[in-house]
Amino acid sequence: MADFTPHTPDNSHSLQSGHGPLFSIPARHHRLDFVPKIKVNGLSLFYGKAQALYDIGLEIPAKQVTAFIGPSGCGKSTLLRCMNRMNDLIDGVRITGQLLIDEQDINAPDLDVIELRKHVGMVFQKSNPFPKSIFENVAYGLRIAGGSSQTALTEIVERSLRRAALWDEVKDRLDSSALGLSGGQQQRLSIARAIAVDPEVILMDEPCSALDPIATAKIEELIAELKSSFTIVIVTHNMQQAARTSDRTAFFYLGRLIEYKETAELFTNPSVAQTEEYITGRFG
Amino acid sequence: MARKITAGRVGSPLGFTAPPSLHSVFARGEQWVWFSGAALAGAIILIAGLLLIIVANGAGTFWPKSLVLVERADQSKVLGIVTEHGVLREETPGNHVREVPQTQFKVANRDLFGSDFVWHRDETLAQASQPNDAIAMERLENGDFFGFLKSIKNGETVVATGDEAWRVLEDQLPAITSLRGQISTLQHDDVGRINSAIRSAELDIKREKANAGARSADVIAALELQIVDAKQRYEVLTAQVGILQSQANVWAAVMETADGRTKEIALSSIVDVWRPNQMGIRAKLKHYFRHAWSFLTEEPRESNQEGGIFPALFGTVMMTLIMTFACTPLGVITALYLREYAKQGLVVRIVRIAVNNLAGVPSIVFGVFGLGFFVYFIGGNVDRLFYAESLPTPTYGTGGILWASLTLALLTVPVVIVSAEEAIAAVPRGMREGSLALGASKFQTITRIVLPGALPGILTGVILAMARGAGEVAPLMITGVVKLAPELPIDGQFPFFHLDRKFMHLGFHIYDVGFQSPNVEASKPMVFATTVLLILIVVGLNLAAIRLRNHIRRKYQMGAFN
């Protein structure tokens, strides 16, 4: 269980949120066939005056892959970025409602954001290796945390690169710049970098949108392997990808969660018309 | 078969190529291409022309030019170097203006002729020759001497005459030059050491008297003994110097000028002697590089018009380095705060505009500020706190290299701030997010990702700042530059770095030699040579910084930033 706070979290502040009844999860979402890792309760998000997310409620299972799909601008990335508080970096963002990870409100004022981000890793849409060597890229999270010996570092870097299926390609040039890697390799490096700090959740924001089909296939394989150890949330534009990789899928439209259920069911038997229209390609 | 798409460009049924008309030329904006090209060409021509003039004039300074012996119509003779041709406009009776061609000679022998240069009308010049035995001589005082060697004297006895005399002169000169070196070492270093010992003992006495402790009398007595001892050593040294000087002064060359006057010149006052009309190209090259080297490494003589410029060179480089070390951290930290921490809003915008405008404030204003703030306020307080015993003689409370460098650092810091801010902003957002997403704090992200990524761009700003600071003169004139600094800011005397000392600067040197010297014409070559050197230094410092930047850029492979 992750512990982001130096003392017991106090969630009382978010209970005052004025957006409807707090635990307003629609009945069709509320099954107890999984252990929820992340719970979103009545979450709304505003960029200044514009509202981007409306009263989102969903529960994300531990050690499974959850996909967020929906047309551009539907808020799926915004919700993803709420989960490690990346939206803090944007001026004028206001959040109401609750986002719990392991039953802790991550928006609580006494929460240590740095600690949170160590537990909730992220892989970005545009691969963003640091202008350092491959080794240093993977070791970055450990170095800033401090306390790892050089031998431990070497070991963890190798293990992370192996788990990210990149080791064989880069083992002879760990000291060369990470910027010399191909796009797919850079993205797998980002994954290795994220898993090196041993998070519990990995957020992936359209990790394959800039990759060719072969590189995409490699990442998807990797996701399938990683879900035994991590809770993975992936945002994707590619519905085939969501269908192939995820256990559960959430469909968003215009800032609202339209439908959220097991992937197979959502794609074969959507219960909302908008979902059906989107997955059959009639809009989006 | 589909139509070829490319066919349109070569005049096809698709009709992409309209017949060339004036209208279409304007529509395509062709004239702007030409206009901007012409502007660029103009700028390049101006810069290249300026450099060419400076380098052409400066580089020729040390070349041994031929001595011409000209017989004038009235039988008088002129020996010198042809320096310029000109036209004299002369009014003749009847209000006609006659243009008379004339030639300028550098005839040297300032002590005899009163001036180094003389103009003669070409019509008065009858016959020119280049006599092989004409001698040019660089002297410690009174500039050059041009003439003919008659004989060499040791004391009152004539040792050699004619060709033999030249041989003896060449033989004796190196020994006497090294003797002169010894004398100057004794006078500068040893006497300097004794002087500073006396000075510090006197200060100790002063302090002891002020304290008036129980054992003060003993301490003062001991210190006074030290002073007496130092003064005795000084006497010994002076005697030694006197002996060496009399040794050096024994030899003299008897010279004859073109107009038949003789002049006895002590060998100890001769810096170099050469016979330009006899020198081959190799000898001339050797002469050229020897003189260029001594220009770089020696101290100036004769109110800066002769000799070298080493102190100015040293002062310029040192001042630029201190300035860089002062303005870079200040600028980078300011830029970091403005870009990373400050809340972007009206205040930050105003600060940013103010910083940009600061770069446009006249440099003399910075100079006055530096004088008031650094020299009088900070320096004055430093003196009161730490150098009270030497007051009223100021130590830091007067212009010095530290204050001048800090003043220039203030002047150049806006350049660093602006470019550092741009470089920091150019570090991709994704990289910061990547770092933050791994649990790095903002500070860690800045030190490990943002700053290394922005470093090449920051260095670009530093390069610009250095280029601006190295050439700046006006603020220095009131914060520590002097015409002649007897001592360098770094020397062998404890504590080795003397940042309170006044210093010399190439830019000021140019102004001083070129426009403040009694003999402007004679110092013209020095001015050009100094200018070339100043440009070379600025280019050299910039190249060093650019190399450093490229090295860093290669290390991080960040082609996207500059």
Image (cartoon, coloured by chain):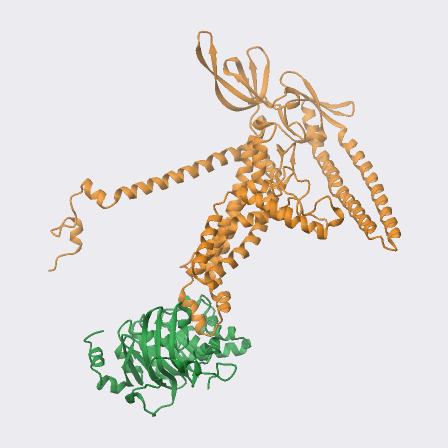
Chain colours: A green, B orange
Would you say B192 lies left or right of B83 here?
A: right
Give the vertical position of B42 relative to A214 (above or below).
above
Relative to B228, is B281 above or below?
above
**Residue extending farthest top:** B94
The foreground one among B271 and B94 is B94
Residue at point 80%, 34% (across, down)? B242
| In this picture, residue B37 sits left or right of residue B168 | left
- Answer above or below: position of B504 versus B430: above
Residue extending furthest toward the bottom: A33
Q: Position of residue A205 (x, y in %)?
A: 35, 74
**Is any part of residue B389 visible from this angle?**
yes
Splitting the image into 4 quarters, where does residue B228 fall?
Answer: top right
Instruction: Choose top left, top right, bottom left or bottom right for residue A45.
Output: bottom left
Query: Looking at this view, is B67 or B124 the one in front?
Result: B124
Q: Residue at x 47, y 66 (%)?
A: B449
**Split into 4 quadrants, where in the image is the C terminus of chain B?**
bottom left
* Residue B243 placement (x, y as % from top left): 81, 34
Q: Nearer the viewer, residue B330 or B20?
A: B330
The reply to whether residue B494 is in sight is no
> Where does the N terminus of chain B fall, quadrant-wise?
bottom left
The spot of residue B338 in percent (x, y) is 47, 59
Residue B93 appears left or right of A248: right
